[in-house]
Amino acid sequence: MTYPRAASYETRQWFYRRVRLARYVAAYLRARDKCDGGDSIQHEKWNVAATRAFFAWAASRTRLCVYLFPGSGCYDAPYHEGTGVPVMRLRADGFPPEYKEVHPPEYVLTWYGVEIAKWLRSNGLVSN
């Protein structure tokens, strides 16, 4: 999110606290409901359609790829299947549990970076 550069430090802190609270409440509600309410299915269908539409729009404008970190769920296929967009599924089989965390420690992120760079190069998505 952005805010006017002229906003005071206090104003920015007020804003950040409210946004953080809203995110915590939303995360709690999702965890409590296990995301299986009636609206979740429609919301997921909309997300898939919007993602696929973005791929179709962006494919002629830039190079695309999908990155799935080791802790990704199994709901990735509808988003990219049949789109022609390359998919990197970073695997951490046999690694400690922190390699599958959404926000892993620095040494795990370093490993992610090395593996991602290798994959991007091997798929011709970046120059050497």
Image (tube, helix red, strand yellow):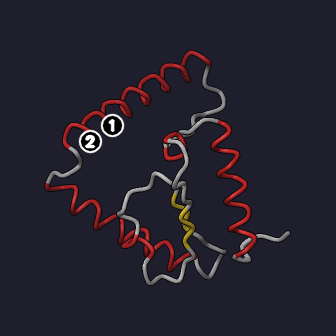
Residue 96 vertical position relative to residue 11 in the rendered view, above or below: below
- Please give left or right for residue 62 compared with residue 41 in the image: right
Amino acid carrying label 1: it is Ala
Distance between mark 2 and mark 1 Cα atoms: 5 Å
Disc 1 marks which residue?
A: 27
Q: Nearer the viewer, residue 128 or 21?
A: 128
Q: Is there CB contact under 8 Å for labels 2 and 1? A: yes
Picture residue at 39% right of the left edge, 68% below the top: 50
Task: In this rendered view, identify the residue nearer to me: 23 or 92.
Answer: 92
Above or below — where is 46 with respect to 18? below
Measured from the top left, where is residue 97 in percent x and y? Answer: 49, 41
**Residue 116 percent coordinates (x, y):** 67, 60
Q: Nearer the viewer, residue 86 or 56?
A: 86
Query: Pointer 2: what residue?
Result: 30
Q: Residue 82 bears which disc, if any?
A: none
The extreme right residue here reads: 128
Q: Secondary structure at mark 1?
A: helix
Amino acid at pointer 2: Arg
Q: Residue at x 66, y 74 (%)?
A: 62
Q: Residue 30 vs residue 59: left or right?
A: left
Taking the image as shown, residue 9 lies to the left or right of residue 128, namely left
Residue 58 higher or lower than 2, as above or below: below
- For residue 52, which quarter of the picture? bottom left
